Image: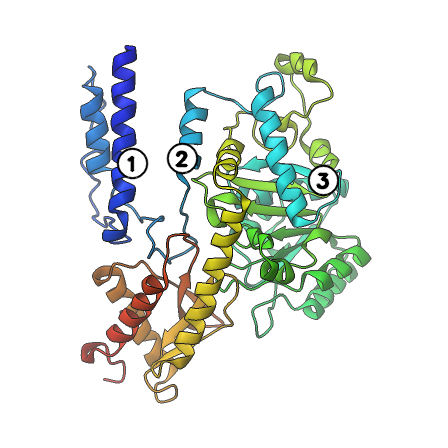
Amino acid sequence: MSREAMLELAQRAAELLVEWNEQLPAMDAWDGEFREAPASVASEEPPENGQPALDVLERAVQKILPTTARLAHPRSFAFVPSSPTWPGVLADFLASGYNVNACTWLVASGPSEVELAVVDWFRRWLGYPEGAGGLFTSGGAAAALDALVAAREAAANPQRASVYMSDQTHSVVPRAARIIGIPGERIHFVRSDSEYRLDVSALAETVARDRAAGVHPLAVCANAGTASTGAVDPLPAIAEFCEAEGLWLHVDAAYGGFAVLTHQGKMLLRGIERADSIGLDAHKWFYQPYEAGCLLVKDVRTLEHAFGLHHDVLQDTVWGAGHPNFADRGLQLSRAFRALKVWMSVQTFGLAAFREAVSGTMDLAARAGRYIDARPTLELLAPVSLGIVCFRVNPDRAGFGETALEKLNRAVLARVFWDDRALVSSTTLVETFSLRLCILNHNTTWDDVRETLDAVERFGAEPRLDASG
């Protein structure tokens, strides 16, 4: 392309993105497609001859990109949403434009230096010691996989290994365990307590049973903010147990880890600094575009021991001797320059802005819990933790049976999905169907939360949704 054509295309793309962000609050939080037949774009043959680039851009923006869950919408409360900063978006544009492969110091010394710096920010925020380190990953799944590989290698690849986690643990963690070769019968889902936190006494009983059966306990995977309820496992007690038993402790803090920026969050996550590894997702509560996962380990050499395998074609990377090669710390050789978005965002806004945003969303969640408790037809189903609120419609708090209440709340969820601007999801809490808000967006206001709760209550009162009839 000519310089003029490149600039024209880039300018138009930027205009479209800014317009999208300006219009987003007035849109619905979801606009997807459930047709069985594939969309026309998916069934097309690739063109033999090119088309005008501006036409291709406009078509992508009109026909493809809007048909999504709008995760940055201020009323996007489903699953774990994401609301990226504009400098973070531009960082990805720059990293792609420079075509960075953040694999080795020789290939990408400047990007590697930035990744070292940002990982060290995270290290200090979490309270990890000098000598700890890590790398950026695609997300929590890759972080858990890298961590369990490191745990396996640190334990000298034991036979009949087993791993332990709460029954509230995200599915990416047992998936990682399966990938490293732990069969399903040796992936133990330990019961949680009444607040959905891992029961340490049940963990001890399960580990003792395995040892007696000749199984080799390898690792415990704890939660610093479960996806369902935001529950934080009793990290100090779990760390104490793992140290006594010689077990690797991995903490899945993909969603909740950045709460450590606040005083309240630091108290909730006390003990996380004792873990052998921690997974974080900056594309969740640190306001970055996808992908921006991160894995930290207490001793960075455990990663390098597990992944530092070399090939003749990479022998020239020794020219960076004395500097880390991030390809030696995880499963990827070809790696995007993910750390730039965090670095540019923090440099632009300052850490205080992020701290205020995280604290503000925690306050909104706590306020939502109080609001639900005060409403006669809404019921809080779990303690509000971090930014997650679990609740349901319960018209008289006693009269309906559980089957009828589940039917009613499923119907309410569908009504919100199709007929309200907000996007809300559900979870299951010990066989109880629950509506769920995950409040993370720095642009979300109390009106966004309150009006969504009011819509839930209103839909639950509609005669045709009356589960008793």
| Label 1 neighbour load within 10 Å: few <14, some 14-19, many 20+ | some
On the image, the x and y values in percent for residue 372 come to: 40, 76
Amino acid type of disc 2?
Val
| Label 2 neighbour load within 10 Å: few <14, some 14-19, many 20+ | some
What distance separates the C-alpha of mark 1 from that of mark 3? 38 Å
Near-viewer residue (183 or 47): 47
| Residue ID for mark 1 | 17
| Label 3 neighbour load within 10 Å: few <14, some 14-19, many 20+ | many
Q: Is residue 121 above or below residue 449?
A: above
Q: Earlier in the sequence, mark 1 or mark 3?
A: 1
Could you tell me which secondary element the residue under label 1 belongs to? helix
Q: Earlier in the sequence, mark 2 or mark 1?
A: 1
Circles 2, 1 touching at the beta carbon (< 8 Å): yes
Residue at x-position 63% and y-position 31%: 116
Of badges 1 and 3, nearer the viewer stands 1
Q: How is the image coloured?
A: rainbow
Amino acid type of disc 1?
Leu
What distance separates the C-alpha of mark 3 from that of mark 2? 29 Å
Residue at x-position 42% and y-position 59%: 439
| Residue ID for mark 2 | 89
Q: Residue 20 lies in what quarter of the image? A: top left
